Each structure stands twice: as structure tokens, then as C-alpha cells.
Image (tube, helix red, strand yellow):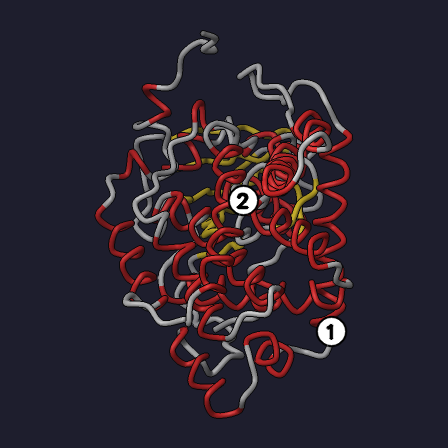
Amino acid sequence: MESIKEIFRIGRGPSSSHTMGPNRAAQLYKQKHTNAKKFRVTLYGSLALTGKGHMTDKTIIQELAPAEVEIIWKKDETKDFHPNALEFEVFENGGYKDKWLVYSVGGGKIVDEQSKDKEPELIYTQKNMQDVLNYYKKTGKTFWELVFETENNDIEEYLHNVWQVMKNAIDEGLNNEGLIPGGLKLQRKAASYYAKSKGLGGYAQTTSRIFAYALAVSEQNASGGKVVTAPTCGSCGILPASLKISQEIFEIPDDKIIRALATAGLIGNIVKHNASISGAEVGCQGEVGTACAMAAAAVTQIAGGSPAQIEYAAEMGLEHHLGLTCDPIKGLVQIPCIERNVHAAVRAFDAGRYAILSDGKHFISFDNVTQAMKQTGKDMPSLYRETSLGGLAVFGDEDFVDN
């Protein structure tokens, strides 16, 4: 498997595949053609279908400025390698000069025709969850210890930076109020939910705080704020909310949060290596489902869970999101995405508590459910995979319901 740095990427929302990836591609292409006066960028498949809502065109135009940029939308054409494809063309001295086809494959990562079949740098000898559990049986070391042992020496510093960005997103999201851009007339709710949580007690307050923290990050993401992919922008509120509430409950220092982040990253890595974290490939089960598994593993570790219980919690987090479609209304990472982050964060917290109460034994392994998720994604029609052609994107695209 690759470095967990590929799971945790820092950038601006609302989408890792539709905003971060294209932004990075535009940045690289501009560096290659610094004096160009005109670019043409063609968006294919999922990028064309939901690019407006994900600000794909805006981030490309801003990155290529001050050059003239023509955006072409080919909604009915999909490239074989990946549904998120875009092609850059440059015109210099009055004529065509060069073109570059690139794919945004999820989590902010991009590849082109030369690199798409290239084997990534695999630094982990472990390929799946069973390999990780075998490592524990052999060495006595748990998930986060494997990460620290395998990654470069700067991994702790990197994860500290990740956690700081996550905390900032929570704080900023709790302070910001008003309308979320995009046209759905959706108001921010994080500040209100947090204020109301102060009047509650016990589990009601705990869940309300989780709601508020997940809302805060997701609303920041939907507004184009700075977030961390975990493993994507569309699911970026789940892990920070779970870690924040766990830190408050158990009164632990940031160092323990960093270890939990390492474990979460390893879980995301396993899914990415063996299935997919791309909504355009496997639906929202690959984004929110994976994020829930990552968060469930993290909170279970913080609560003192054994490796078996951590694996169980992660399995539950992914299993109970199987079949979840990616069908955002108007292509915006808002409805149902924001609420999905909220409820998945609570589900992760509950999966951790459930696993802690158990002996860690269960019927379906994490590797089993990962393969089931991959197959489910393949069987899912494309209209339910980040194209906004089916599901809630069709039937939910109506006026605000106020009964």
C-alpha cells in the first residue's frame, strides 16, 4: 500500500475529485506553459455532469488566470480508464500547441496516460487487513505502530498538521453562519447545533456535539474552505468530528489523536488499495462508508480497544454503508452529503462503543466487506455514481420542504 499521506490531502473543497484534482492538474499545466494566453479544457463524464456544482470550472479558470480559458462540457462522453477525465489544450502565437489528458481518480490524486498504469510507490508490505492483523500477531504492535514504523520520519509532523487543519475547520465552521453558496438556499447549521447542545446532557449532548462538529467541517468544505480529505472532501467531516468528541470525552492530548489518525489512515489505505474511495467509481459507500470505517477504528483505539475490536468497528462502519449511492442534488456537495457526514460520524462513534462491548469476534471480516463494497460499486448503475442523473438528484430537486 501507498503512504497514508495519499489519504490525508490538505486543500480547498468542495470535492477532492472534482475540485482538488482538477485544480492540481491546472496548476501543473500552467507551470508547463507559463506564457500561454489561451487554454481550452474539456471535461468528460462525471466531471462534466456535476462539475458546476463542484466548482470544477471555477477552480480551473482561477488557476489558469490571467489566460483566457474555454471550458467544454462533454456530459455524454466518458473515458474508459476513469469517469473523471479532463483534457487541457494550449494555444500560443495564434495556433494550437499541446494537449494533455488527465484523470482525477479520487482523494485529490491525478494521473495521466503515462502514469495511469504505473505502479504507485508501495511502502507497506501489507496488502489488506488480514496482513495487518498478522503483523500484530507476529510483533505485538498495533495499527498506529505499523504506520510509524513504515512511513518516513516526518509522518508525525505531517499528521499534526493534518489535525491542526481539521481543528481549524471545526472552529471556523462553528463560528461561520449564513447561506452556503450554490443556489440551494441552504443555511449553515453548525453554530446553532453547537449552541443548543450546551443545554443538553449525557448522550444527547454527546451526539449533538458530534452533529455540530461534522456540520462545521462539511459546511466549510461546501463553501470552498480549507479541509483535509479523509478520505475525500465529500466525507471530510466524519473523522474530525469523531476525533474531536473523543478528545473531549477521554481528555487526551494531541499525541493520542495523532496515533488514532495513523490508524484511520491505514484503514482508508486498505480500502483504497483493495476497492475504491471514489464516488464516481463506487458511489458514496466508497467515500462516506470508508470515512465511517476510518473514524470507527480511530475512536475504538482511543477508547482502549484491542486490534480485533478496532477491526470489528471498522468493518461495521463500512458494512452498514454498503450500496450507498452518490446522488447530490444539482451536483453540489451539500444535499445529502452534509447530513450523511453528520450521521456517519455518530454511526462511527456508536460502532466503536459496540465493538468495545464485544470480544472482537464477528462473522464478516473487514476484507470481506471491502470486496463486497467494490463489487457493489461495479454493479451500481452510473446514474448513482456522482453523475446527478438518478436518485435524490432527480427526485429531491424540488423546492424547500417546510411542513
Q: Which residue is disc 2 drawn over?
A: 97
**Residue furthest toward the bottom?**
138
Left or right, residue 148 beside residue 98: right
What residue appears at the point 41 percent right and 76 percent down from the top-left corner?
Answer: 127
Disc 2 is placed on an element classified as strand
Identity, as a three-letter code, of the amino acid under mark 2: Lys
Q: Do the residues labelled 2 and 1 touch (CB within 8 Å)?
A: no
Q: Quadrant of the C terminus?
A: top left
Report which quarter residue 254 is drawn in: bottom right
Q: What residue type is labelled 1?
A: Asp
Specify the label residue 154 is tagged with: 1
| Real-space Cα separation, disc 2 to disc 1, in angstroms | 41 Å
Above or below, 38 against 269 in this view is above
Give percent across and percent down for residue 81: 34, 53
Q: How crowded is mark 2: few (under 14 residues within 10 Å), some or many (20 or more)?
A: few
Q: Which residue is found at the position 36% from the left and 33% from the top?
A: 387
Point out the residue furthest to the left here.
Answer: 379
Task: Determine the image quadrant of residue 397.
Answer: top left
- Check the image and report above or below for 352 versus 339: below
Task: Tell me which label, 2 or 1, sits earlier in the chain.
Answer: 2
